[in-house]
Amino acid sequence: MAKAEKIKLASAKIFNTDEADETLARIAMWQDKIAEIEIEERSIIAAANARMVERTAQFRRNIEVDEVALEQWARTDRATLFLPGTKILELTRGAVGFRLPRGRIKLLLAVENIIGKLKAKRMTDCIRTTEEPNLERLWNYDDERLAEVGCRRTKPKEKFYYELKKAEVK
């Protein structure tokens, strides 16, 4: 929000509980309007996405058919297309080729068992650990003990809030 808008909003004054109630009613009304607009806009976006998918569907199917045909051609004529030791064939409008992706590790035992075996074999570099302070547990210690470990408790700042009773406002 721009500074000018904040100043304009800050200049609105409430002098009694009736005006405060009216303000809460206005806020509820504005939130309802925002929700209505968001629903409308999301439906417009969803409709546009549906149109886009529909308009591009045939092109996507054509690409899939062409990709399958390219792969079949490259596999069928692999021996004549690719020089020994090469996996890429450069063409005028691009390239075709074969890649050998990296293999994967499959866990054959429960994770706990694997971790135990890794520790026993001193392969701890293969174990991920995330260490971080447990703030909930630290809360239970006194300020002196917190200071010893390089922490301090902050005093909470009072924060204004309001609650809307939407059923009653409408």
Image: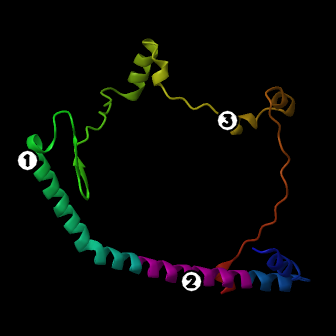
Residue 106 place in picture, x, y as percent: 31, 31
User: What segment carries the magenta color?
Assistant: 26-46
In this view, the residue in front, 153 or 72, is 72
Which badge, 2 or 1, comes first in the chain's sequence?
A: 2
Query: Is 156 placed left or right of 91 in the picture?
Result: right
Residue 140 place in picture, x, y as percent: 76, 35
Query: Is 30 placed left or right of 82 in the picture?
Result: right
Residue found 58% across the figure and 79% down from its top:
35
Q: Which label sits on residue 76?
A: 1
Task: Kindly report the distance in space between the C-alpha atoms of the residues bearing marks 3 and 1.
Answer: 60 Å
* Disc 2 target residue: 37
Q: How many residues crowd mark 1 within 10 Å: few (<14), some (14–19), many (20+)?
A: few
Query: Quick one: quadrant of the N terminus?
Result: bottom right
Q: Residue 116, located in which quarter of the rendered image?
A: top left
- Image height check: is 111 above or below 90? above
Disc 2 + disc 1, Cβ < 8 Å:
no
Q: How many residues crowd mark 3 within 10 Å: few (<14), some (14–19), many (20+)?
A: few
At label 3, the amino acid type is Asn
Q: Which label sits on residue 23?
A: none
At label 1, the amino acid type is Thr
Residue 132 place in picture, x, y as percent: 64, 33
In this view, the residue in front, 141 or 61, is 61
Query: Is 94 placed left or right of 71 in the picture?
Result: right
Single out the residue that lies furthest toward the top: 121
At label 2, the amino acid type is Ile
Residue 126 place in picture, x, y as percent: 45, 23
* Disc 3 target residue: 134
